[in-house]
Image: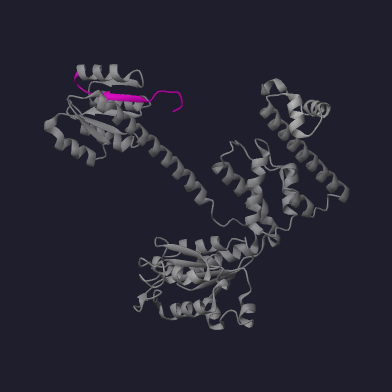
Amino acid sequence: MGSLKYTILIADDEEKIRKVLKINLKNKYRVILAQNGNEAIEYLNNEVVHLVLADLRMPGRSGLDLLQYVQQHYKHIPVIIITAFGSVENAVQAMKMGAYDYILKPVKIAEMKPLIEKALHYAQVLTENVQLKERLKKYEGSREIITANPQMLALLETLKQVAATPATVLIESESGTGKQLVADSVHYMSSRADNPFVQINCGAIPENLLESELFGHEKGAFTGAIHTKRGKFELADTGTIFLDEIGELPLELQVKLLHVLENQKFTRVGGTQYIQTNTRIVAATNRKLIDEVEKKTFRSDLYYRLKVVYLQIPPLRERQEDIPLLVQSFTEKYKLLNTHGQKNVEVSDEALDILQSYSWPGNVRELENIIQQSIIFAKDGPITSETLPPEILENAIKPSLTKAELQDEKNRRTETIIRDVECNFLKRILSKTRGNITRTAEISGYDRRQIQNLIKKHDINTENFK
């Protein structure tokens, strides 16, 4: 709430209790007093309230009635019930209905104050969680496949058809094209959407641990196996398992995976009992698996078992019409999730032209990273050619940009970078020396005249460092 006081609404039909509570709380909080439940509801509907203290028994609407109203209309506001010893059962009922806590009469201020602090902290966390969930909901909503490319639109139609079946899927495409997003879509458009979606990168786990990760292990199966562990296939039961970089799977594990595909069962490492599984497999690779089959590094029988449905995602360089759409999506995403304080994120026409003329060897993932980086460098301004990384400018093929113009652009960017580095370097040393030019010259290796010239060049006021 910053420097603003939290507002506490006290609802009690006893004037003495209302006054005592207000006297003890008014220095730290803004306090509103209500004589009964009806008056309290009026305040709730017309004031910003952060906490309600409500007497359990009041004429007209009771504390329970007031609690019920808060739960229905202002669920984020915690309610502390004030009750006499003989009504503890009702207070417990109030907590079951959603009250934060209760406190007994006569109210002890020393007990009341920490309870209020905890309740307000709880309310703040609750509000932050709701806000975070809303932001994440927007972010997750942006994870749909965004495209205007005919090949990709055809792929989306195929996904809808495939999702409705239990068929195994093999995705082959370059790194960064969105294989996981396609796997997500297959799962979340299927009847398994409410069940687990478990993923594992077969190339990111050491070979000696991969079998245990996939199929689990029994206690004592090997040194360090002090507990029985469930593997990814067990965790994904009734859902989908996404086997990323399937081309990295060792040959001996390929045999076990083939057995799972054929029999829908497996054993844990060190186990003898078969475990039944009802798991859909979606596999992905950036290799041409048929080439690996020819090299005998990938089993042909497993290849054809995986390739019931075969999907290829075109690289970004073949879908240039998607770049403006993706750029817009990523700028919206990082405007929503960034911690750098930008209010608006725009991309200049010149920058967009350059982005569309680049070949994107890292595909969509590379584009997303570049947008995120450019937003940081753009600060509160638009993304322009000056905020794009040098490698994008150097490798972008733009017919309207001559070689001389490209070189000028690179020179401008280089000068800007050097100027920024030089200025920051000087400010750091001046900060250490508290603006002492002689000491700054000694530390930096420049002479006094050079330091004075740099100070003038960057328009630095040394008084600011004293």
In the displayed structure, 126 sits above or below 187; it is above
Name the residue rendered at 63%, 52% in the picture: 368
Residue 303 vs residue 430: left or right?
left
Residue 155, quarter of picture: bottom right
Query: Which one is in front, 409 or 75?
Result: 409
Q: How many numbered discs, if any?
A: 0
Magenta residues? 1-14
Q: Position of residue 403 (x, y in %)?
A: 87, 51
Let me know if residue 135 appears in the view. Answer: yes
Q: Quadrant of the C terminus?
A: top right
Give yes or no for residue 15 being in the magenta stretch. Answer: no
Q: Residue at x 30, y 25 (%)?
A: 9
Instruction: Tell me residue 43's x, y (percent).
Output: 32, 24
- Evaluate whether residue 325 shows in this view: no
Q: Is residue 12 magenta?
A: yes
Q: For this view, does 45 lie left or right of residue 386? A: left
413 over 306 or under it: above or below:
above
The image quadrant that residue 459 belongs to is: top right
What secondary structure is the magenta-colored segment mainly? loop
Residue found at the very far left of the displayed protein: 86
Residue situated in front as seen by the camera: 409 or 441: 441
Q: Position of residue 369 (x, y in %)?
A: 63, 51
Residue in view at x 77 percent, y 29 percent:
441
365 relative to 371, above or below: below
The percent coordinates of residue 11 (x first, y second) are 25, 24
